Image (spheres, coloured by chain):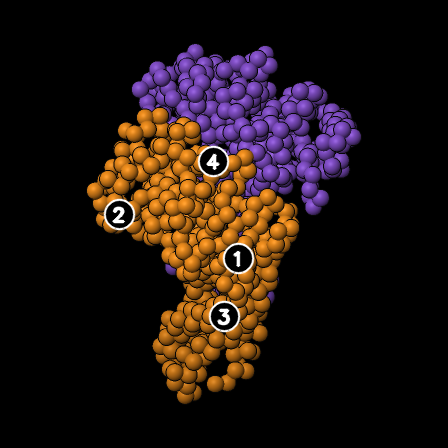
């Protein structure tokens, strides 16, 4: 029966080609726009570390002495971060601080460049599943002894060494020699989650969270030696003398911890509270009730990482899809009802209402499949356009299998939805009335 | 024109009528908001900026030793001024729309703190000697910095310059001292204060929020000596004829690399930098234009399709009307009026929806209230679109010969 309906549907579509093309195009354009924006949304709002993100937490304390703060700063001061890190109360913990440092490669004849540098601790690599091409990260011992070693990104390794194994080579970072111990494989977390902070101050313009990760990673302590008092500050709550960053009233170090079970997470929360209480009794903190422990995904939500332009585009695309849907419903309805006579004959010859309904739905579904193919092509075009846009996440825009299948699913669902009402009306046609006018 | 028969016929086709009205309404609502968003972005892209944008090129120099800046910067500037075609050169800390922002909050009375809600956040620009001329700042009142101002200014231990003179933009003057002359006035922060010696035409901040408000122009300028700059005068600005910018920029970069073999340079023509800043806004605006155009096309074709069907369905009725004396004009008018009513209902609903969507976006996104005139303009546009779309099918209806009445369907 399905084959016969399909044949009927094809005949009907061929009978009025302009209308068919119009309906297919409307669905294709609607699907193309929605799927393009949905794919971008899916890429930007996804879990950057599936399977591990639920174990990662972001502790915050409030070291400020000002009265008007309602919540802690987005990052920590040196003292609190290092205290919490050295307590080693989590399964893993990593400090994070940023600087842009001059980098030279004495062994290759390249001009010096300014490299985005991350000072962190050894747990960073296993904790965030960072993939290595050559070598490995440094050890906890290197953290303790401030060993001058670095891990470099795949991009930098290509730029300096043509992609060859550069482990053991020496680079000059600012004024110090450092030895390469590891080279990362291409790594593009989306967003660069461990750098996310201050999203609520960015007015929805958060595309920069989706840029490339740093080019150079080095032990936190070695970073303090190589680049003293010159790490990037998040903000200050008092006057800073610019000379003693570690004791300044400024926040500039972030801490990430891994807690593998809910019990450990609640234990860590109480540890954080006791640390804050202790600091308050020592007179270093004023606020004891401002500490916070957010999970990775919660922290990303809190920072509203998905740029507001992307969210707006998605809503716009869905409004657009709704317009296309109304359009298709109207056209299908007009089309089916125009065939009232034909349907009357079928009903008089014994076809049930559900048979007529099924026949109409097959026709609508066929339009959906055709629209889906068109929509898929337009989605590819849309993503190609996005890849050419001057935005940080441009290179991430690709259609994965899930989104490819959703394109067709969405197209068929949309057109069945569009077909349901007209088909219902068509199946309700009273045969006698139609036969009379024949 | 009699409306009643039209309404009677629409009542018989209730579902398609409702659908087309909803489609027009939704199109109207989205169109209003999309056009408003396009307008906002276009006005941001076009924000005026009182520096000599079309004559500037810039070379950033980092990685050099801060301790020798006192002799390095004058030497570098002398070399840059020697490049043929360079009309002026200077060193600055940052440029408008460069993303490199140094913000601080100030108040008009001495008892302020950073956390005081009454303070206003400025972007701080530090100028080396001659940079005011290189940038082409336009003085409205007062004076530029003199040689003593430059010599006396330096960075000490605070993240603020140790000087007491400042230039502010017209927008800051209006905000801090509305209705008064800002000249000679002082603004304060916890440990520092600055007295306004000059008011200049509005210069954009390194970062703007794209809302087109006066706060985009809260830029304050301070003199800075080369030796006291502590690595904060890293950007060289060159003024030349627009046609020379590219050559001057490359020559300057070459010169700076020769003089500072340890340095890392990064150069740009200022108008490219400005374009770069607005690139994502521009692409979003184009995307919105594309969506509007396709959306209007889909709606128009929807109207064409549906009216064509109705015309086909009513051929016999049209024939009868023609046979009993209706002119072609009458038939055309019938379909045009019908569309006018449909669009009217859609537009009324759409305007209400547009307003609602704008309220929602204001709450959840960084969007301001839509000016009222967007609503009637989109309403009229959709009405016009409807009339245009219905023209084809209406003409076909008018061409139905009266003889059709005598044939069976």
Q: Which mark is residue B146?
A: none
Residue B7 location (% of width, % of height): 55, 78
Q: Nearer the viewer, mark 2 or mark 4?
A: 2
For disc 2, the neighbor class at 10 Å (few under 14, some 14 to 19, many from 20) is some
Q: Nearer the viewer, mark 4 or mark 1?
A: 1
Determine which residue is flagged by label 2. Answer: B87
Determine which residue is flagged by label 3. Answer: B373
Chain of the residue under the numbered disc 1 shown in the image? B
On the same chain, marks 4 and 1? The answer is: no
Secondary structure under the numbered disc 1 in the rendered image: loop
Residue A187 seen in this snapshot: no
Residue A59 seen in this snapshot: yes
* Among the two numbered marks 1 and 3 on one chain, the one whose residue lies closer to the N terminus: 1
Residue B365 location (% of width, % of height): 57, 53
Do callouts 1 and 3 mark residues in contact (Cβ within 8 Å)? no
* Rendered colour, chain B: orange
For disc 1, the neighbor class at 10 Å (few under 14, some 14 to 19, many from 20) is some
Chain of the residue under the numbered disc 3 shown in the image? B
Residue B5 location (% of width, % of height): 53, 81
Chain of the residue under the numbered disc 4 shown in the image? A
Determine which residue is flagged by label 1. Answer: B185
Determine which residue is flagged by label 4. Answer: A211
Which residue is found at the position 42% from the left and 30% from the top?
B66
* Among the two numbered marks 2 and 1 on one chain, the one whose residue lies closer to the N terminus: 2
B387 w.r.t. A385: above or below: below
Chain of the residue under the numbered disc 2 shown in the image? B
* Among the two numbered marks 3 and 2 on one chain, the one whose residue lies closer to the N terminus: 2
Which residue is found at the position 42% from the left and 28% from the top?
B67
Secondary structure under the numbered disc 3 in the rendered image: loop
* Rendered colour, chain A: purple
Q: Nearer the viewer, mark 3 or mark 2?
A: 2
Mark-to-mark CA distance, 1 and 3: 41 Å
């Amino acid at each position: 029966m399905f084959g016969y309906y399909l044949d009927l549907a094809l005949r009907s579509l061929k009978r009025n080609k302009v209308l068919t093309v119009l309906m297919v195009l409307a669905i294709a354009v609607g699907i193309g726009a929605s799927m393009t924006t949905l794919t971008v949304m899916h890429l930007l709002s996804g879990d950057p570390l599936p399977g591990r993100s639920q174990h990662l937490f972001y502790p915050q304390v409030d070291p400020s002495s000002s009265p008007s703060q309602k919540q802690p700063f987005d990052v920590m001061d040196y003292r609190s971060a290092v205290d919490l890190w050295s307590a080693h109360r989590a399964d893993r913990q990593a400090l994070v601080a940023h600087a842009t440092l001059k980098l030279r490669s004495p062994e290759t004849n390249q001009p010096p460049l300014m490299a985005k540098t991350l000072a962190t601790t050894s747990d960073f690599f296993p904790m965030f599943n960072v993939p290595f091409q050559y070598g490995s990260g440094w050890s906890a011992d290197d953290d303790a002894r401030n060993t001058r070693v670095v891990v470099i990104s795949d991009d930098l390794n290509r730029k300096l060494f043509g992609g060859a194994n550069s482990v053991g080579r020496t680079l000059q970072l600012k004024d110090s020699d450092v030895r390469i111990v590891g080279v990362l494989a291409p790594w593009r977390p989306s967003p660069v989650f461990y750098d996310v902070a201050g999203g609520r101050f960015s007015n929805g313009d958060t595309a920069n969270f989706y840029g490339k990760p740093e080019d150079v990673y080095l032990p936190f302590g070695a970073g303090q030696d190589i680049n003293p008092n010159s790490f990037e500050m998040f903000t200050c709550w008092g006057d800073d003398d610019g000379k003693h960053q570690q004791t300044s009233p400024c926040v500039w170090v972030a801490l990430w911890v891994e807690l593998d079970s809910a019990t450990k997470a609640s234990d860590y929360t109480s540890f954080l509270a006791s640390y804050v209480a202790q600091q308050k009794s020592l007179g270093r903190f004023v606020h004891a009730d401002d500490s916070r422990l957010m999970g990775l995904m919660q922290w990303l939500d809190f920072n509203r990482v998905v740029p507001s332009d992307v969210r707006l585009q998605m809503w716009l695309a869905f409004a657009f899809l709704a317009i296309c849907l109304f359009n298709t419903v109207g056209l299908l309805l007009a089309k089916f009802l125009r065939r009232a006579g034909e349907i009357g004959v079928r009903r008089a010859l014994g076809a049930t209402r559900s048979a007529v309904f099924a026949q109409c739905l097959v026709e609508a579904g066929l339009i959906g499949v055709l629209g889906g193919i068109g929509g898929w092509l337009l989605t590819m075009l849309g993503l190609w356009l996005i890849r050419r846009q001057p935005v940080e996440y441009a290179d991430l825009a690709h259609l994965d299998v899930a989104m490819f299948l959703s394109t067709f699913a969405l197209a068929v669902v949309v057109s069945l939805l569009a077909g349901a009402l007209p088909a219902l009306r068509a199946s309700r046609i009273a045969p006698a009335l139609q036969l009379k006018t024949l | 024109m009699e409306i009643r028969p039209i309404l009677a016929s629409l009542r018989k086709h209730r579902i398609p009528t409702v659908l087309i009205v909803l489609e027009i309404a939704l199109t109207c609502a989205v169109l209003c908001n999309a056009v408003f968003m396009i307008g906002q972005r276009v006005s941001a892209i076009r924000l005026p900026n009182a520096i000599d944008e079309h004559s500037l090129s810039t070379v950033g120099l980092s990685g050099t030793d801060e301790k020798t800046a006192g002799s390095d910067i004058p030497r570098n500037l002398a070399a840059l001024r020697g490049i043929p075609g360079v009309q002026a050169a200077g060193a600055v800390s940052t440029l408008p729309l460069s993303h490199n922002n140094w913000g601080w909050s100030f108040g008009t009375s001495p008892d302020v703190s950073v956390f005081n809600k009454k303070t206003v956040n400025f972007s701080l620009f530090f100028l080396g000697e001659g940079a005011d001329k290189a940038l082409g700042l336009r003085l409205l009142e007062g004076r530029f910095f003199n040689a003593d101002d430059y010599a006396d200014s330096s960075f000490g231990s605070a993240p603020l310059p140790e000087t007491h003179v400042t230039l502010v933009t017209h927008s800051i003057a209006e905000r801090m001292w509305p209705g008064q002359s800002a000249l000679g006035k002082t603004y304060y922060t916890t440990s520092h204060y600055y007295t306004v010696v000059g008011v200049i035409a509005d210069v954009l901040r390194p970062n703007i929020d794209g809302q087109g408000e006066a706060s985009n122009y809260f830029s304050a300028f301070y003199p800075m000596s080369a030796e006291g700059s502590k690595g904060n005068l890293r950007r060289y600005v060159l003024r030349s004829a627009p046609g020379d910018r590219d050559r001057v920029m490359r020559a300057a970069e070459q010169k700076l690399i020769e003089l500072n073999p340890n340095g890392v340079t990064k150069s740009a023509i200022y108008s490219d930098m400005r374009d770069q800043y607005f690139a994502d806004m521009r692409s979003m605006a184009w995307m919105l234009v594309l969506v509007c155009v396709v959306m209007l096309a889909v709606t128009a074709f929807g109207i064409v399709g549906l009216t064509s069907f109705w015309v086909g369905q009513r051929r016999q009725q049209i024939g009868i009307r023609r046979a009993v004396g209706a002119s072609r004009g009458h038939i055309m008018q019938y379909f045009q009026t019908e569309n006018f009513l449909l669009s009217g209902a859609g537009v009324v609903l759409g305007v209400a929806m547009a307003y609602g969507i704008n309220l929602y976006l204001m709450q959840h996104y960084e969007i301001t209230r839509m000016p009222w005139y967007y609503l009637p303009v989109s309403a009229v546009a959709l009405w016009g679109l409807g009339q245009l779309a219905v023209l084809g099918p209406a003409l076909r209806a008018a061409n139905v010969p009266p003889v059709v009445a005598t044939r069976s369907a």
